[in-house]
Amino acid sequence: MFQDKGWVLVTLITLVSPSWAAYKLQERYSWNQLDFAFPNARLKEQALASGDYIPQNGLPVGVEHFGNRLFVTVPRWRDGIPATLTYINMDRSLTGSPELIPYPDWRSNTAGDCANSITTAYRIKVDECGRLWVLDTGTVGIGNTTTNPCPYAVNVFDLTTDTRIRRYELPAVDTNPNTFIANIAVDIGKNCDDAYAYFADELGYGLIAYSWEQDKSWRFSAHSYFFPDPLRGDFNVAGINFQWGEEGIFGMSLSPIRSDGYRTLYFSPLASHRQFAVSTRILRDETRTEDSYHDFVALDERGPNSHTTSRVMSDDGIELFNLIDQNAVGCWHSSMPYSPQFHGIVDRDDVGLVFPADVKIDENKNVWVLSDRMPVFLLSDLDYSDTNFRIYTAPLATLIDNTVCDLRNNAYGPPNTVSIPKQTVLPVGPPLYTKQYRPVLPQKPQTSWASSPPPPSRTYLPANSGNVVSSISVSTNTVGPAGVEVPKAYIFNQHNGINYETSGPHLFPTLQPAQPAGQDGGLKTYVNARQSGWWHHQHQG
């Protein structure tokens, strides 16, 4: 009997082997192909027979969580998509492969009914006022098959009444013949009326701002930071090599509100490894559309194989972003320099996270990740006997634990110091990497109990106590209002003429005009903090 217990103990220890410890995200929902909640079986059969519903043609691209509903968007890239804006009733479907329910109803998902319905939705956003923001692109098809039966229109729904409370068509001056908008960021200021939405025009190379209070929009155009990097247009995902060299400004995230009352908008072109930033003080001002070039900031590159399409930032200043080349989700704490050594990987899965298309953080600081194998869907053929689409979730604190993004962790350098290498200019010559990278989509692990343990289940297990803590606390030596200790950091970038100030209970940069540079030039970073897990650094170029 004692020996049996010992064998069980050894087995349990083996099952939690560190070789599988990286799997933090837990699978909540998954599908081989998407299914929709038709009113009855007869109508579903009619839709299948007529081609109004073709199960193999649906691809989920966007996810958002609110209350007991998980929203999923399905663009009408191909025929047979009965609804583009849908949700899962999480009370009725705790896990598994649930049918997608049209939101707010079937009629509101009628393609081509411009005034009353949504034709195609991509990424969506729920704001802190309980409103769901949806940009209807008005398009059917993709690439050369695209038609535009409807104009681009902002649709906002009240999630307490499930009614649309605003529809605003983007005027022709805010778009151009190449316009393609898939991403949205929503900025809430002093109150729910002080709201702005920002839209990234990926192929028209622009950034559109919309004011809720004014019910008006304006466009920032032709900034070079909106354009793709000609050296970053080659992609390798799931063993497929392809070129998305024309893809410009795409993923966006917003910092918490800074001491000046504004946020920082971070963005990246899809064909790029670099992040850029601008204060919403600029974006909210219609008069700055033509004279704001120097108010935009170029940050560092993330490193090789770091294309990203989706990003989100928590109210702690922690940014999460998908890494589509790496089948991974990355992180960066915005109080730290935007350098590769301050970027972490929160999870990676070469089967389940192939093309993690969307990443969101909800009101409870839970993270939601949707993966959909998009390049395989577009450029090859999905195996519909296999699981193709997955939605994962985990508390934010769990994901960043033991990464460089967790400032409670002091394992990433000596206390109060870290070495940041000087930026260098590569000499002109042959490329550094000549071997073409063509990763192959791995098969599902064939685990032998005799040789190696299986990974822990990624299946969602509901919390039984509700006491998971996902907040982050930081101790510093700067005292703020009411005796609260407030972290501070200052970053001066001479090249871009921007002074970053981090101050407040949440760590985030403030973009302000810089003071005249000193004689030494380069990048100076000052971090003032006392906790041993923090760093102080001064770098002179």
Image (tube, rainbow, N blue to C red):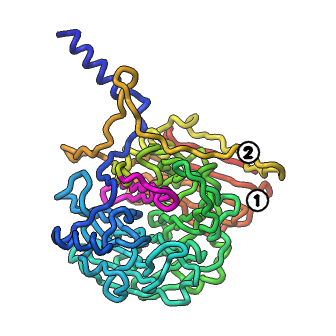
Looking at the figure, which quarter contains the N terminus?
A: top left
**For residue 434, which numbered disc appears in the image?**
2
Left or right of 289 in this view: 484: left
Instruction: Give the total number of marks visible in the rendering.
Output: 2
| Residue 319 can be seen in this image | no
Residue name at image x 19 percent, y 43 percent: 464
- Magenta-colored span: 356-384
Q: Nearer the viewer, residue 69 or 418?
A: 69
Above/below status of 259 relative to 119: above
Question: Label 2's element?
Answer: loop
Indicate the position of residue 286 as horizontal and vertical percent values. Answer: 55, 85
Residue name at image x 58 percent, y 86 percent: 287
Q: Residues within 10 Å of mark 2 (few under 14, many from 20)?
A: few
Above/below status of 224 relative to 420: below
Check residue 507 for magenta coloring: no
Above/below status of 340 relative to 411: below
Residue name at image x 48 percent, y 48 percent: 328
